[in-house]
Image (tube, rainbow, N blue to C red):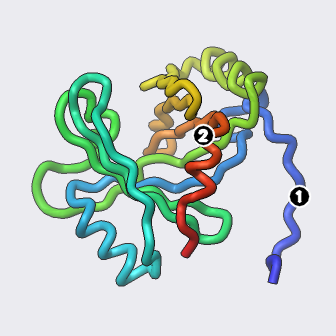
Amino acid sequence: MSGLLTRPGSGFSPSQGLLRAEQFQIAYATNDIEAACAVFRDRFGITEFQRLEGPLPDGGHIRVELAWVGTVMYELLTASGPGSALYMDRVPDDGFVIRHHHLGFLIHDAAQWAALAREAERVGAALLNQRQNEGFMRTCFVAAPELGHYLEYIFPEPAGLEFLNAVPGN
């Protein structure tokens, strides 16, 4: 079954607004990623994740668990140490929690990446945590305090697309 809804097409262009890119991801931050994976498995039916972890540029550490459910990628993340504030700023220090952190948007090409930067500047939104992992992907965040979460923009290169396409489906 392809779907019950007939949806309008979209001319994705961040130049028309920060929500006008292809949304594909919903992410949650947690202070106990093993417990969060168990919640997503036992309560929400997401049984298999792809792990990505490593050092943060400022010296901290990040761990991410990714899973596809249909056309939506779910991300669980936790981070600690220097440079982790962007990821953990809404997660209390005590007691297990899972908090919505960001919506992820796919940027298709260099023109959309440039349009995103121009639109963010036009509306007075800083591009936070800009990263360029050569050959893998470019990423950045925009704070959306009106919405209560961040927006993340991902512009994958071939190895990044290969990685995203290898994330397990549930």
User: Which residue carries the number 1 mark?
Assistant: 8
Label 2 CA crowd tier, 10 Å (few <14, some 14–19, many 20+): few
Q: Is residue 96 found left or right of 50 in the rendered image? A: left
Q: Is 46 placed left or right of 20 in the picture?
A: left
Query: In the displayed structure, would residue 82 be above or below residue 122?
Result: below
| Residue drawn at (66%, 42%) of the image | 106
To which quarter of the image does residue 58 belong? Answer: top left
The numbered dot on residue 101 is none
- Residue 48 image offset from top left, x and y in percent: 44, 72
The quadrant of the rendering that contains the C terminus is: bottom right
Label 2: element kind = helix
Q: Position of residue 46 (x, y in %)?
A: 46, 75
Label 2 sits on residue: 159
**Which element type, helix, strand or loop, lies under badge 1?**
loop
Instruction: Report crowding for label 1: few under 14, some 14 to 19, many 20 or more residues within 10 A (C-alpha).
Output: few
Instruction: Name which residue lies at 54% across and 24% down.
Output: 134
Rendered residue at 58%/29% (across/down): 135
Mark 2 near mark 1, Cβ–Cβ under 8 Å?
no
| Residue 4 location (% of width, % of height) | 81, 79
Amino acid type of the residue tagged 2 in the rendering: Ala
